[in-house]
Amino acid sequence: MRERIAQACAATHRPADSVRLLAASKTFSADRVREAAAAGQHDFGESYAQEGVEKINATRDLPLTWHFIGPIQSNKTRPIAERFDWVHSVDREKIARRLSEQRPAGQEPLQTCIEVNISGEASKSGVAPADLLALAKSIASLPGLRLRGLMAIPEPTDDMALQRRRFAHLRELLHQLKEALAQEGLVLDTLSMGMSADLEAAIAEGATIVRVGTAIFGERTKA
Ligand SMILES: *Cc1c(COP(=O)(O)O)cnc(C)c1O
């Protein structure tokens, strides 16, 4: 997997260490997480809060970084706020406010990406690009969250040119956001985009975090 990322970086003249690999471990056991950690993997992503917390508890002895990458229901924010280091999938203000309020005072702010809907009507999750700036401003004002960038999950397609157009769109949205919020002193350095099937296109368009499940752990047997 690291070889594939290194090649994708080389192909677009990026340093190999400019892309962070997040292992999307949903549905895989804590033992599989331990194996990956023993092989040098440090960042893990979970899509279900309860399942994620169980794995965090089961690997407490390891210095891992945990990212929440799934859809967020407003009654499930507390475990995310209390136990995760990053959240990639904030797409509305109500969720952001709850996460901030529930982030324990002694902890670093929760590193936060806004999920953007760059596939139009085909996708249910993510804020519409037109509403992004307002959401970013409100997140930037919340003490329990630290806004770091954007995330997207485009609809699957084998057409690499289309994959690249969508990822380029997210890159452009981050660029616009940086300009609009230049006075706020934020570090907007994160583009969380690219999965097993499209990480080359994402890296070519500037991904700084790729979220990879199947290509690391194999096929998932449940959703
Ligand atoms: C499962 C998941 C991934 C990884 O998908 P693969 O196709 O298995 O690489 C990436 N991002 C999110 C949000 C996911 O839920």
Image (cartoon, rainbow, N blue to C red):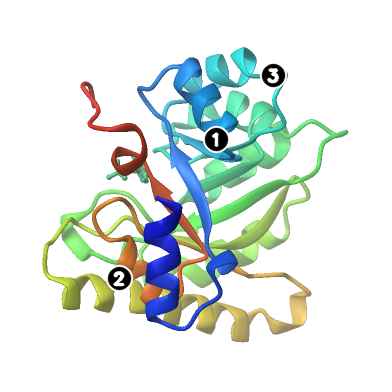
* Residue displayed at 18% across by 72% down: 160
SS state under label 3: loop
Q: Residues within 10 Å of mark 1 (few under 14, many from 20)?
A: few
Kindly identify the amino acid type of the residue bearing the numbered disc 1: Ala
> Of 84 and 7, which appears nearest the observer?
7
**176 horizontally vs 4: left or right:** right
Give the residue number, with chain letter if any, for mark 2: 201
User: Which mark, by number, is residue 39?
Assistant: 1
Q: Residues within 10 Å of mark 3 (few under 14, many from 20)?
A: few
Residue 190: percent from left, percent from top: 57, 65
Kindly identify the amino acid type of the residue bearing the numbered disc 2: Ala
Give the residue number, with chain letter if any, for mark 3: 60
- Position of residue 113 relative to residue 41, above or below, is below
Ligand 1 sits in quadrant: top left
CA distance separating discs 2 and 3: 35 Å
Q: Is residue 130 visible?
A: no
CA distance separating discs 1 and 3: 17 Å
* Residue displayed at 46% across by 68% down: 207
Mark 3 or mark 2, which is nearer the start of the sequence?
3
Q: Quadrant of the C terminus?
A: top left
Which image quadrant is residue 162 in? bottom left
Q: Residues within 10 Å of mark 2 (few under 14, many from 20)?
A: many
For label 2, being within 8 Å of ligand 1 is answered no
